């Protein structure tokens, strides 16, 4: 198996074609839309009729027999038949010209024919386009406050950029490129075996169709070099962990002057010591004294925007109760408005009391009837009923 450039023509005989170039479908006496079974049946019937053994010495029958074989050889092959339906006999003649009587018809440029019918997958003399540069990823960590307000940050990354001395061509300044001898400038080569052709990228020029005679010393013929690059990243308000910012054209430079890729900034929001986040909703836990929980009152807590938020505690609030401050959460990314702040109340029991405080609590305890704490009273009533049932 040998490699050959895409452009040269391939020749393959398909059998005898008469001087009058009779239509293959008419020779087999079938319609143009006939299926493979009908074509095969018609060929067997006609081949038996005009076979030389049954017509000894009949030159016309022998000529007809050869023409029938040529027609069947074409129409039984899907690719040959498609080419014939589109171009007629010209599809099988060298240079799209006519062939004389008794001469084997030859394929023209197979790649051109099948490319026009099926697309570049079957042929194609076009050289491979230089591939685009790779996309890059950069991970950035921001605080919750920065995610709230947004920020502008400079980052420095090591990235492939266009080589300045050669301008991305990969050739030493003052020199040029030449056509690849292996593929004749087409970027692809074919390996032919019979009718089947395998097409692959040229191993010499890697699909470019050209080779560099004198590689650039700065980039060693790559057309790009690794250099540090400082970029400014605008982080909008409302970003969250997993938010991705795309910097178009700031990725890796493409080889030999091809377009660059993109740079993607993946954001990670650092865990906060006060607030937890769920989308645009912020959550926090606020401990209050048991006297505030019993009597109610007004307390102040810090907001994510730096302002103090007034929180009205209703009398008799219990631990685990959640209060909501509308519009005190995170801003909507690329939208309007803000989420909410959810405050979970935790009632703290005092652990260090003065003598006077203990006396006051003892006085309170002495006046308790049990109705002050309905949950406790109900629980112990249920315990009492369960005990009575047991006894």
Image (cartoon, grey):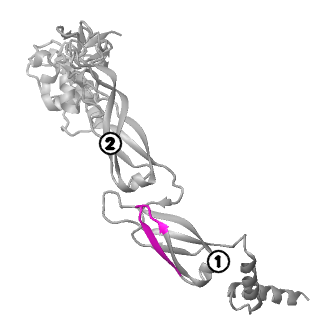
Characterize the local packing of mark 2: few (<14), some (14-19) or many (20 or more) Cα atoms within 10 angstroms. some
Q: Is residue 251 visible?
A: no
In the image, 195 versus 36, the foreground residue is 195
Examine the rendered structure and indicate whether residue 194 appears above or below residue 47.
above
Q: Quadrant of residue 59?
A: top left
Residue displayed at 17% across by 30% down: 116
* 295 sits left or right of 259 in the view: right
Q: Which residue is mark 1?
A: 290
Residue 80 locus on image (x, y percent): 23, 26
Q: Quadrant of the N terminus?
A: top left
Residue 95 locus on image (x, y percent): 11, 16
Q: Are marks 1 and 2 in contact (CB under 8 Å)?
A: no
Residue 356 locus on image (x, y percent): 73, 80
Seen as rendered, the residue at the extreme right is: 391
Q: Quadrant of residue 238?
A: bottom left
Characterize the local packing of mark 1: few (<14), some (14-19) or many (20 or more) Cα atoms within 10 angstroms. some
- Does the magenta portion include 187? no
In the image, 310 versus 275, the foreground residue is 310
Q: Quadrant of residue 256?
A: top left
Q: Quadrant of the C terminus?
A: bottom right
Pointer 1 or 2: first along the chain:
2
In the image, 294 versus 136, the foreground residue is 294
Q: Which residue is mark 2?
A: 233
In the image, 237 versus 99, the foreground residue is 237
- Does the magenta portion include 308? yes
Label 2 SS: strand
* 226 sits left or right of 15 in the view: right
In magenta, the rendered stretch is: 301-313
Examine the rendered structure and indicate whether residue 337 appears above or below residue 85.
below
Task: Compute the Cα span from label 1 to label 2.
Answer: 48 Å
């Amino acid at each position: 198996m040998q490699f050959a450039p895409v452009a040269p023509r391939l020749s393959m005989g398909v059998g005898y074609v008469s001087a009058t170039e009779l239509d293959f479908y008419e020779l087999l006496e079938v319609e143009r839309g006939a299926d493979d079974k009908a074509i095969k049946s018609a060929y067997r019937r006609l081949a038996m009729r005009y076979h030389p053994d049954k017509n000894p010495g009949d030159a016309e029958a022998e000529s007809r027999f050869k023409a029938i074989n040529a027609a069947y050889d074409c129409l039984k092959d899907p690719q040959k038949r498609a080419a014939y339906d589109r171009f007629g006999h010209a599809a099988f003649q060298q240079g799209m010209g006519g062939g004389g009587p008794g001469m084997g018809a030859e394929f023209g440029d197979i790649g051109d024919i099948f490319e026009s019918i099926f697309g570049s997958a079957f042929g194609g003399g076009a050289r491979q386009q230089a591939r685009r540069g790779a996309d890059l990823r950069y991970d950035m960590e921001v605080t919750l406050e920065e995610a709230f307000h947004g920020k502008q940050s400079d980052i420095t990354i090591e990235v492939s950029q266009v080589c300045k001395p050669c301008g991305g061509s990969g050739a030493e300044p003052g020199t040029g490129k030449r056509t690849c001898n292996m593929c004749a400038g087409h970027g692809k080569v074919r390996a032919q075996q019979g009718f089947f052709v395998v097409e692959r990228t040229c191993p010499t020029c890697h699909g470019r169709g050209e080779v560099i005679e004198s590689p650039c010393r700065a980039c060693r013929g790559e057309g790009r070099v690794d250099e540090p690059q400082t970029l400014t990243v605008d982080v909008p308000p409302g970003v969250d962990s997993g938010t991705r910012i795309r910097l178009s054209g700031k990725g890796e430079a493409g080889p030999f002057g091809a377009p660059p890729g993109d740079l993607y900034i993946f954001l990670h929001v650092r865990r906060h010591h006060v607030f937890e986040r769920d989308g645009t909703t912020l959550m926090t836990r606020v401990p209050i004294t048991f006297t505030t929980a019993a009597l109610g009152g007004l307390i102040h807590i810090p907001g994510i925007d730096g302002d103090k938020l007034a929180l009205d505690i209703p009398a008799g609030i219990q631990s685990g109760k959640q209060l909501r401050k509308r519009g005190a959460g995170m801003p909507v990314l690329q939208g309007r408005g803000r989420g909410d702040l959810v405050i979970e109340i935790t009632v703290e029991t005092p652990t260090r009391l003065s003598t006077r405080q203990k006396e006051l609590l003892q006085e309170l305890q002495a006046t308790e009837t049990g109705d002050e704490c309905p949950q406790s009273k109900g629980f112990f009533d249920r315990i009492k009923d369960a005990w009575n049932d047991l006894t």
